[in-house]
Image: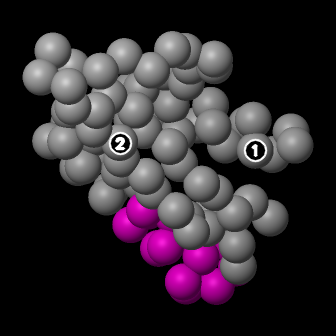
Amino acid sequence: MKSSIYLAGALSALTGLQSTVASPVIFQTDGTFKLTVFSDLHFGENPEGVCGPEQAKNSTMLMKTVFPCEKSDYVHVLLSVR
């Protein structure tokens, strides 16, 4: 659990987004609600190998690219932390 909280804080710092808890769902005036989900992100896996750090770097770059473009009403990030 501590790893997940730490990682969520790190992702918040990297992306500039703040995590919110128990926020109400608010639809846009046109009735839409844009949801962005990032799933199966693996951070901290195989740190000694080439794939581990590169994979984390690529995931972070992808999120930093998508967040400002999508203008989502809600973003959910599912992580695998080891």
Residue visible at 55% across and 15% down?
Answer: 23
Q: How many marks can you see?
A: 2
Question: What residue would you read off at disc 2?
Answer: 35
Residue visible at 67% across and 43% down?
Answer: 7
SS category of the residue bearing label 2: strand
Q: Main secondary structure of the magenta part?
A: helix
Quadrant (top left, top right, bottom left, bottom right) of the N terminus: top right
**Colouring scheme, one of rainbow, by chain, secondary structure, one colour:** one colour
Q: Position of residue 25 (x, y in %)?
A: 45, 20
Q: Position of residue 33 (x, y in %)?
A: 28, 32
Residue 51, compared with residue 33, is above or below; it is below
- Quadrant position of residue 70: top left
Q: Which residues, given as a range, are shown in magenta?
A: 47-59
- Quadrant position of residue 50: bottom right
Magenta includes 50?
A: yes
Residue 55, compared with residue 31, is above or below; it is below
Q: Residues within 10 Å of mark 1 (few under 14, many from 20)?
A: some
Question: What residue would you read off at disc 1?
Answer: 4
Q: Position of residue 46 (x, y in %)?
A: 70, 79
Of residues 17 and 77, the one nearer the viewer is 77
Q: Which mark is residue 23?
A: none
Question: Label 1 sits on what residue type?
Answer: Ser
SS category of the residue bearing label 1: helix
Quadrant (top left, top right, bottom left, bottom right) of the C terminus: bottom right
15 left or right of 46 in image: left
